[in-house]
Image (cartoon, grey):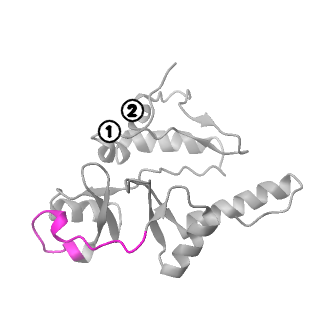
Amino acid sequence: MTVPAGAGALRAAPLDGASPIRPTAVPALSFLPGGWGAADSTELLSSPRMAQIAMLLGRHDSRRIVVFDSPPLLQTTQQAEEALAFMREHELGSIYVTDMDKHLKGYVTRRDLRGKSGQVDEFIAPVDSSIELATTLRDALSEMLIMDYSTACVVDNQKRVRGVMSIEMIQKTIAESNASMEEDGQEGSGG
């Protein structure tokens, strides 16, 4: 069975256990190819079907962590009231904003949007720093600690948003990698 990448894979993924997930050369790491998404990616990621898929992906192993590399994003053309409702619903204090081509434009906070009307692009604050896609975890963590960011936007070489990473996510990944190496009789590298 051929399953498309990205949002198409999630839309087409059967809920009976068959999976579009691909293995990697790294032990205990697999992925769902990201593709370039679809116009309704945000709606798909917040849908009941996505909740079902995430539950299915995580239920086979309690140690499994399901990470979506498509963070919640707002587009510059979205209305402030709609964006604020989305942020409240998902308990987000701030959120990155992109243009229609997913180029990072900045971020907004709930405080920025409270009581406002108009398009989100009227209230965007610039992002001081972003993490390039090829950055190592160690370098990303260092940059985030220096900049005092708990999360950072990950962008490709054309400044299109590819994901969001957090210090907590990096720490968890390093700890799991070290634990896996210890189980295999190797010493952990710390990143």
Out of 173 and 148, give the one closest to the viewer. 148
- The residues tagged by marks 1 and 2 sit, at their Cα atoms, a distance apart of 8 Å
Vertical position of residue 125 compared to residue 82: above or below: below
Circle 1 packing at 10 Å, graded few (<14), some (14-19), many (20+), is few
Q: Is residue 104 left or right of residue 77?
A: right
Q: Is the magenta stretch mostly helix, strand or loop?
A: loop
Vertical position of residue 8 compared to residue 156: above or below: above
Residue found at x 81% / y 56%: 181
Residue found at x 53% / y 31%: 20
Residue 189 drawn at (x, y percent): 77, 64
Secondary structure under tag 1 reads: loop
Q: In this view, does 152 lie to the left or right of 112?
A: right
Residue 120 drawn at (x, y percent): 18, 64
Picture quarter with the C terminus: bottom right
Vertical position of residue 36 compared to residue 148: above or below: above
Q: Quadrant of residue 135?
A: bottom right
Stretch in magenta: 112-129
Residue type, numbered disc 1? Ala
* Contact check, label 1 and label 2, Cβ < 8 Å: yes
Circle 2 packing at 10 Å, graded few (<14), some (14-19), many (20+), is some
Q: Is residue 151 left or right of residue 31?
A: left
Q: In this figure, which residue is indicated by the disc labeled 2? A: 8
Secondary structure under tag 2 reads: helix
Residue type, numbered disc 2? Gly
Check if residue 125 falls in the magenta segment. Answer: yes
Residue found at x 23% / y 70%: 124
Residue 66 drawn at (x, y percent): 55, 49
Q: In this figure, which residue is indicated by the disc labeled 1? A: 38
Q: Identify the residue at the far right of this view.
A: 185
